Amino acid sequence: MAISLKINKVTQSRIEQFDFEHIEFGKHFSDHMFKVDFKDGKWQDPEILPYGPIEVAPSISAIHYGQAIFEGMKAFKNEQTGKPQLFRPLENHKRLNKSALRMGMPEIPEDLFMLGLKTLIDIDQQWIPTKDGSALYVRPFMFATDDFVGVKPSSNYTFMIFCCPVNSYYPLPIKVLVEENFVRASEGMAGYAKAAGNYGISMLPTALAKQKGYDQIIWTDGKTHEYVEESGTTNLFFVINDNTVWTPALDGNILNGITRDTCIQLLKQKGLVIEERKIAIKEVLEAAKNGQLTDCFGTGTAAIIAKIAAIGYKGEDYVLPNAEDRLISNWLYQQIYGIQTGKVEDTFHWVETIS
Ligand SMILES: *Cc1c(COP(=O)(O)O)cnc(C)c1O
């Protein structure tokens, strides 16, 4: 059955006033957004409308109980053809539905998700920045909208997508602190879901680490605090002697990053040994002390690769090799951003062109 998509375009685009030279992450929005409501047990007719505030009841359980989930991906312009393209968007769709299931929310059909996504990016394609390293950040999200304040799953939901042009994002190598008190997720919780509450609870521990001079924290397991899980909202990689790569196995607490999977596939193809397993903070620090930890980074859509300069643990900082000289993280960044923008051949068929 064909979906009918209502399109209500802005009368005047804001693009003329937009300064592509001065973009701050997450502060600027393209002209349009996509919106579809879930009501009477089914998804209603979707629409594309001008980006702007939406009206919700004060009682919605998204606000009170965190029945809200999100995704994050990027759109790029192909350097050769100039056509907009997305990177592995079906993976975001699958993950959104896993988050939805965990939070007692309805799944969204693939055709509805992809129609909204592709039409929105097609309409707002002039908002995709083309300067090296930049992209259009795309934020799909779903939240509960019943006008009812009891703790039970809502019957009504809204799914939306909006877009933010983002600049080249080469973060400086970061200092991370191993967190041994606060926990992001533990067995049976919802660590694998991009559920709003998982991020709310991370803000205080992160702010406390910043007060101590760190940029971010490394989450450890909730039972023993001996094993590393993630760093902030990135998945962790540890490179030993530039030939073996450790990354924590997906144990239900860790978010299944699409950049993580992309790195694993690229590194396997390159012939490196990948160990997905439980990783003790002790072995990481031992490798750092011996000079065997040649590279260490977090992975995620926003930065692709966030290099780690130093790891703080029980009052001691373990300094890692100079960021510019890192073979693996520099190679991964070039490969991934290259595939995303059409500079590097897409042998894995990860790119979805919008025509
Ligand atoms: C989104 C996210 C990641 C990275 O996932 P990508 O699909 O690579 O962007 C990693 N950890 C957490 C906690 C996240 O929310």
Image (cartoon, grey):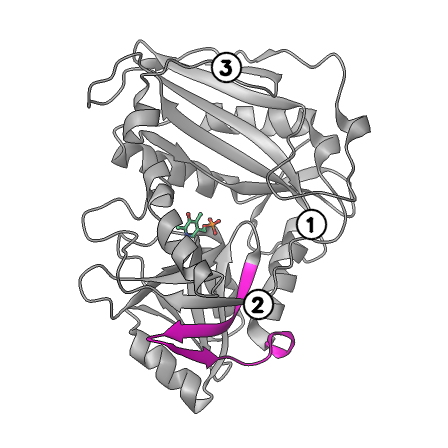
Dots 3, 2 in contact, CB < 8 A: no
Residue 65 in the figure: left or right of residue 169: left
Q: Which residue is mark 1?
A: 341
Q: Which SS class for mark 2?
A: loop
Please tell me which of labels 3 and 1 falls first in the chain: 3
Residue closest to the far right: 16
Q: At x 58% / y 65%, what residue is drawn?
A: 332
* Mark 3 nearby-residue class (10 Å; few <14, some 14–19, many ≥20): many
The residues bearing labels 3 and 1 have C-alpha atoms spaced at a distance of 29 Å
Query: Disc 1 vs disc 2: which is toward the camera?
Result: 2
Amino acid type, residue under disc 2 in the picture: Pro
Q: Which residue is mark 3?
A: 46
Report which quarter residue 8 is drawn in. top right
Name the spot of residue 178 as percent of width and height, x first. 36, 67
Name the spot of residue 33 as percent of width and height, x first. 58, 23
Magenta residues (range) = 305-326
Please tell me which of labels 3 and 2 falls first in the chain: 3
Report which quarter residue 304 is drawn in. bottom right
Q: Which SS class for mark 3?
A: loop
The question of residue 316 being in magenta is answered with yes
Dots 3, 1 in contact, CB < 8 A: no
The correct choice, above or below, for 125 with respect to 192 in the image is: above
Dots 1, 2 in contact, CB < 8 A: no
Residue 25 in the figure: left or right of residue 46: right
Amino acid type, residue under disc 1 in the picture: Thr
Report which quarter residue 58 is drawn in. top left
Q: At x 40% / y 67%, what residue is drawn?
A: 177
* Mark 1 nearby-residue class (10 Å; few <14, some 14–19, many ≥20): many
Q: Which residue is mark 2?
A: 173
Name the spot of residue 112 as percent of width and height, x first. 47, 23
